[in-house]
């Protein structure tokens, strides 16, 4: 039995990861803002689990939840999955708040999620910290500057952490989902290549976490697209990306 702490557990990828771990008999700490959604998930899961209804941007609340979960025993896996996505444009002054909120949730809260677990994991010389990035972090996406920047930062942050902790026995895994069918992608007004059911994603993600794969793009077809995107010259990428449809901005 492992003990697993998951943020963003009330929906989509986080909720599905919780289902996979609970089926294996693991004990979970489940974090998100919507208490009713966490309660509904917990009632469907086998085993006894703890829910923490909080905003991951509240670092003190997050640390208190982590301390509470740690007080019941060592933690094997921490998944920082909470995330938000919205279109943003630099020229739209009111989008700055959205920009800040995306960075605070997708990047800063990931750091705050991992913070309390590093020292206890180092003492045990075991444990895995999992950051959920995105293929959107590989190149800049027009119309999604905040989201794309947050996920590029997640990739580099997790890489830094992985190397910092290399000799300590603590592993760091970065998951980079392509398009996964969840509430986040439900209303995307564009074609989503290789769109994957969330159940299949979660199974593969847990396999990658078990093997401590440093950086895993799921599905595999997206890994090929990503490899290509990394080597395409800027001029070609700009022409190609400018043609694509964009994530809508949050209307006020
Ligand atoms: N779906 C995809 O195609 C895709 C692709 C690439 C990357 N990702 C990444 O995968 C992760 C999960 O996304 P998803 O597709 O599962 O989306 P989702 O269904 O919208 O779930 C997002 C989760 O994050 C939680 N969350 C958001 N803001 C929060 C906050 N301030 N405090 C606490 N919890 C918060 C939400 O819970 P509450 O609303 O209850 O707080 C929810 O549980 C995100 O990091 C996303 O960027 C998804």
Image: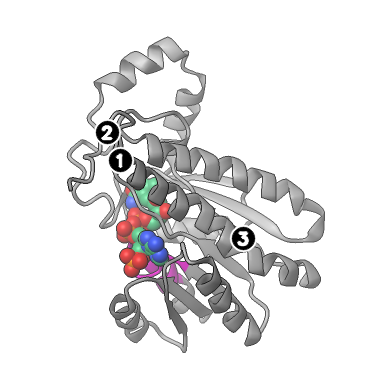
Instruction: Examine the structure image and report whether residue 16 is included in the region drawn in magenta.
Output: yes
- Mark 1: few/some/many CA within 10 Å (<14, 14-19, 20+): many
Q: Quadrant of residue 153?
A: top right
Identify the secondary structure beneath mark 2.
loop
The location of residue 209, given as percent across then percent down, is: 57, 59
Q: Quadrant of residue 52?
A: bottom left
Left or right placement of residue 188 versus residue 194 in this view: left
The location of residue 46, given as percent across then percent down, is: 41, 85
Query: What is the CA distance from the residue labelled 2 to the residue labelled 3?
Result: 36 Å
Identify the secondary structure beneath mark 1.
helix
Query: What is the CA distance from the residue labelled 3 to the residue labelled 1?
Result: 31 Å
Residue at x 61%, y 50% (from the top left corner): 213
In the image, residue 189 sits, relative to residue 34, either above or below, namely: above
Furthest residue in direction top, as rendered:
235
Under 8 Å from ligand 1: the CB of mark 2? Answer: no
Q: Which residues are magenta?
A: 7-20
Instruction: Examine the structure image and report whether residue 156 is included in the region drawn in magenta.
Output: no
Compare residues 125 and 221 and report the one nearer the observer.
125
Q: Label 1 near label 2: C-beta < 8 Å?
A: yes
In the image, residue 31 sits, relative to residue 40, either above or below, namely: above
Which of the two discs, 2 and 3, labels the residue nearer the N terminus? 2
The location of residue 104, given as percent across then percent down, is: 46, 52
Residue 114 shows in this picture: yes
Residue tagged by mark 2?
A: 92
Which of the two discs, 3 and 1, labels the residue nearer the N terminus? 1
Residue at x 74%, y 46% (from the top left corner): 163
Residue tagged by mark 3?
A: 129
**On the rendering, which quadrant does ligand 1 occupy?**
bottom left
Under 8 Å from ligand 1: the CB of mark 1? Answer: no
Residue 95 numbered mark, or none: 1
């Amino acid at each position: 039995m492992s003990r697993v702490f998951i943020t963003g557990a009330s929906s989509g990828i986080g909720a599905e990861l919780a289902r996979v771990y609970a089926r294996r008999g693991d004990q979970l700490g489940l974090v998100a803002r919507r208490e009713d959604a966490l309660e509904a998930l917990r009632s469907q899961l086998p085993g006894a689990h703890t829910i923490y209804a909080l905003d991951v941007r509240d670092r003190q609340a997050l640390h208190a939840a982590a301390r509470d979960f740690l007080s019941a025993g060592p933690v094997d896996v921490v998944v920082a999955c909470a995330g938000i996505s919205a279109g943003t444009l630099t020229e739209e002054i009111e989008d700055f708040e959205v920009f800040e909120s995306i960075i605070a949730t997708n990047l800063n809260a990931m750091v705050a999620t991992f913070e309390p677990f590093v020292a206890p994991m180092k003492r045990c010389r075991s444990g895995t910290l999992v950051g959920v990035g995105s293929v959107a972090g590989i190149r800049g996406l027009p119309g999604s500057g905040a989201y794309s920047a947050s996920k590029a930062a997640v990739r580099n942050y997790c890489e830094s952490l992985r190397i910092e902790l290399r000799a300590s026995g603590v592993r760091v895994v970065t998951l980079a989902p392509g398009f996964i069918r969840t509430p986040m992608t439900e209303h995307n007004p564009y074609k989503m290549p290789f769109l994957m059911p969330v159940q299949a994603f979660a199974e593969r993600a847990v396999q990658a976490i078990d093997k401590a794969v440093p950086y895993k793009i799921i599905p595999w077809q997206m890994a090929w697209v990503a490899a290509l995107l990394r080597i395409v010259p800027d001029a070609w990428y700009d022409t190609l990306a400018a043609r694509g449809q964009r994530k809508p901005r949050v209307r006020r």
